[in-house]
Amino acid sequence: MNIPILGAGGWGTALAVAATRAGKRATLWARRPDFAARLSEVRENREYLPGVLLPEGVEVSSHLQVAVADAGFALIVVPSVGVPELLQQLPRDLGLVLCAKGLAPDGGRLTELAGQMGFRRVAVLSGPNHAEEVGRGLPAATVVASTDQALAEAVQDALMSPALRVYTSADVVGAELGGVLKNVIALAAGMCDGLNLGDNAKASLITRGLIEMNRYLQALGAQEDTIYGLSGLGDLVATATSHHSRNRAAGEAIARAENPQQGGKVIEGLRTAGLLEHWATAHGHDLPIVRAVAHVCAGEWTPQQGVTALMGREAKAE
Ligand SMILES: NC(=O)C1=CN([C@@H]2O[C@H](COP(=O)(O)OP(=O)(O)OC[C@H]3O[C@@H](n4cnc5c(N)ncnc54)[C@H](O)[C@@H]3O)[C@@H](O)[C@H]2O)C=CC1
Ligand SMILES: O=C(CO)COP(=O)(O)O
């Protein structure tokens, strides 16, 4: 069985290695032919996942149609901003496993976008899964969510190994948006670190962030079990507290008035914060932490103004 993995950043590379641990072969597609050729030769993704060698079962290709030929499904692991263009080039009967933790250009969900484009078999893969750890085979767990149970089980089989537990779920909204929102809360947690606000502030921020996620996601139809599961609480903890997290580190850099972009790696929360704030406000949802992060990321508020806005909200019961 050959699994096409479209996107050769850190996460795509780690997933390709994970597939070989599950006894499968993987084709790792990179859009730049020179990058694909170098990766194929040196067998290490030095730009995006240094220190993890590609096993023999991973083939690298820059030919998209060759990579997906005869496959039942493909993992889509490019950043959210690149998903629409990539999907445009794929056959509509291909099953999609969307792995980006970001939104469509209009602020909607990527799974909805895929449906609008004519894809019928769509899943989401999400959980507390830093590529640096999954790539090295440290124990981890994740969720594949789809209304297509056969697709979810096929993805589970493709990736499950002694190093990676893969749970299935039918709650696509919960799994998808948990991964989207946690990045924005992780940016805020990083700002707490950068401003040296202390452990109480960060714990309070993460907790109120989870409550904000819970209120919003349940209003959109997500299941509470999912929000308190791996793709919600699990990924929020992993991202808001980890030295691996690009989103947390970006928040810390912003608070220190430094450049949040680190070596070309994608920081989804920077794009998500504004899109989410706009979308939620337009649909009548109040997301105070997301709003504060969006204003700070847009340069409209200083991080300290964000703190003041959140601490100055009206008194209420928990
Ligand atoms: N790194 C991680 O630990 C995890 C990342 N993710 C998600 O996976 C997605 C990809 O992230 P990473 O692999 O970490 O990114 P990365 O920063 O390691 O690499 C980005 C990759 O995407 C390519 N790329 C950039 N813009 C593109 C475009 N417009 N079209 C096609 N390809 C493009 C780059 O050439 C590079 O190969 C993100 O949505 C991220 O939130 C999800 C779980 C874990
Ligand atoms: O999604 C992730 C871990 O589950 C990766 O988070 P960052 O994009 O913040 O590094």
Image: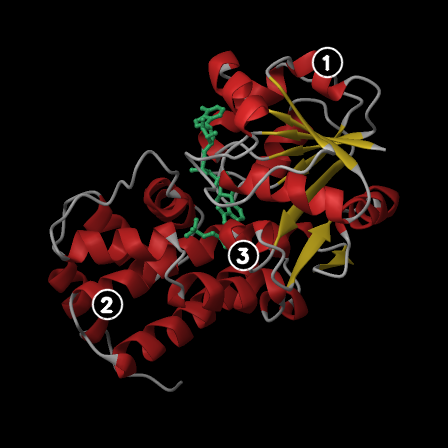
Query: Residue 133 — which label?
Result: 3
Q: In this image, 22 relative to 173: left or right?
A: right
Q: Is residue 299 above or below residue 253?
A: above
**Residue 183 visible to the viewer:** yes
Query: Residue 120 — which label?
Result: none
- Residue at 23%, 45% (x, y): give it: 260
- The reply to whether the residue tagged 1 has its Cβ within 8 angstroms of ligand 1 is no
Report the Cα–Cα distance between label 2 and label 3. 22 Å
Position of residue 203 measured from the top left corner of the image (x, y, whole percent)? 35, 78
**Residue 105 visible to the viewer:** no
Q: Secondary structure at mark 2?
A: helix
Q: Residues within 10 Å of mark 3 (few under 14, many from 20)?
A: some
Say what amino acid the circle numbered 2 marks.
Asp
Labels 3 & 1 near each other (Cβ < 8 A): no
- Residue at 41%, 76% (x, y): give it: 207
Position of residue 310 measured from the top left corner of the image (x, y, whole percent)? 23, 69
Labels 2 & 1 near each other (Cβ < 8 A): no
Q: Is residue 123 above or below residue 251?
A: above
Report the Cα–Cα distance between label 3 and label 1. 29 Å
Residue on which the image places disc 2: 193
Q: Secondary structure at mark 3?
A: helix
Q: Is residue 77 above or below residue 312?
A: above
Q: Residue furthest bottom?
A: 317
Labels 2 & 3 near each other (Cβ < 8 A): no
**Splitting the image into 4 quarters, where does residue 47 fall?**
top left
Residue on which the image places disc 1: 66
